[in-house]
Image (tube, helix red, strand yellow):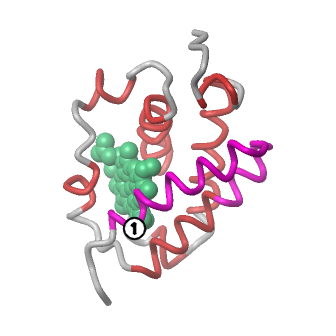
Amino acid sequence: MKIPGTIYEAIGGQENIDKLANNLYKYIAQEPKLVEIFPDDLAESARKQRLFLTQLFGGPKLYLEERGHPMLKRRHLEFEVTHERKDLWLKCMDKSLEETGIEEPYRTAIFQRLSMTAEHMVNNLD
Ligand code: HEM
């Protein structure tokens, strides 16, 4: 599906969004302090992230259709999201943006947007 004027389309549509989410989880899997709070089935987590990033960047509202309103802060409350884990998550996303080949100005715009969301997810001050 082509949706003109969106980040979704500008960075290559569904194919690259899928790569971005899959690469994110590939790197999360390599961070012991981060992956320890995730369920065993990271493939399912990556799938939900693909749905979410698709809609966040202006593509079809796949997450809403399947999971309802994101309410991300609430959905993360059952996991200990510390500042350390937030920084690790963002490091993984940065590496994923690099590997996926997302170019400027989109790379910085996406990273800044996700940095705000990640900060908002922190629910443990250790
Ligand atoms: C700040 C560091 C973060 C940590 C430590 C973290 C951790 C987690 C964990 C443990 C899960 C559960 C996995 C699952 O249900 O399969 C999860 C789910 C999820 N996370 Fe994060 N997350 C972080 C940031 C973010 C950010 C910034 C976003 C948005 C781009 C995000 C989007 C999601 C989504 C969409 C789900 C699936 C929720 C659902 O439908 O159940 N997370 N996250």
Expressed as whole percent of the image width and height from the top left, the position of residue 63 reads: 35, 29
Expressed as whole percent of the image width and height from the top left, the position of residue 69 reads: 22, 34
Which residue is located at x 70 percent, y 50 percent? 97
Kindly give the residue lying farthest to the top in the view shown: 1
> Which residue is disc 1 drawn over?
119
In the foreground, 6 or 86? 6
Image height of 66 relative to 73, above or below: above
Mark 1 CB in 8 Å range of ligand 1? yes
Residue 5 found in image quarter: top right
Which residue is located at x 66 percent, y 49 percent? 23
Q: Residues within 10 Å of mark 1 (few under 14, many from 20)?
A: some
* Ligand 1 quarter of the rendering: bottom left
Q: For the residue marked with disc 1, what is the amino acid? A: Glu
**In this rendering, does residue 1 appear at all?**
yes
Decide if residue 79 is on the left or right side of residue 3. Answer: left
Report the predominant secondary structure element of the magenta stretch: helix
Which residue is located at x 55 percent, y 72 percent? 88
Which portion, as a residue range, is magenta? 94-121
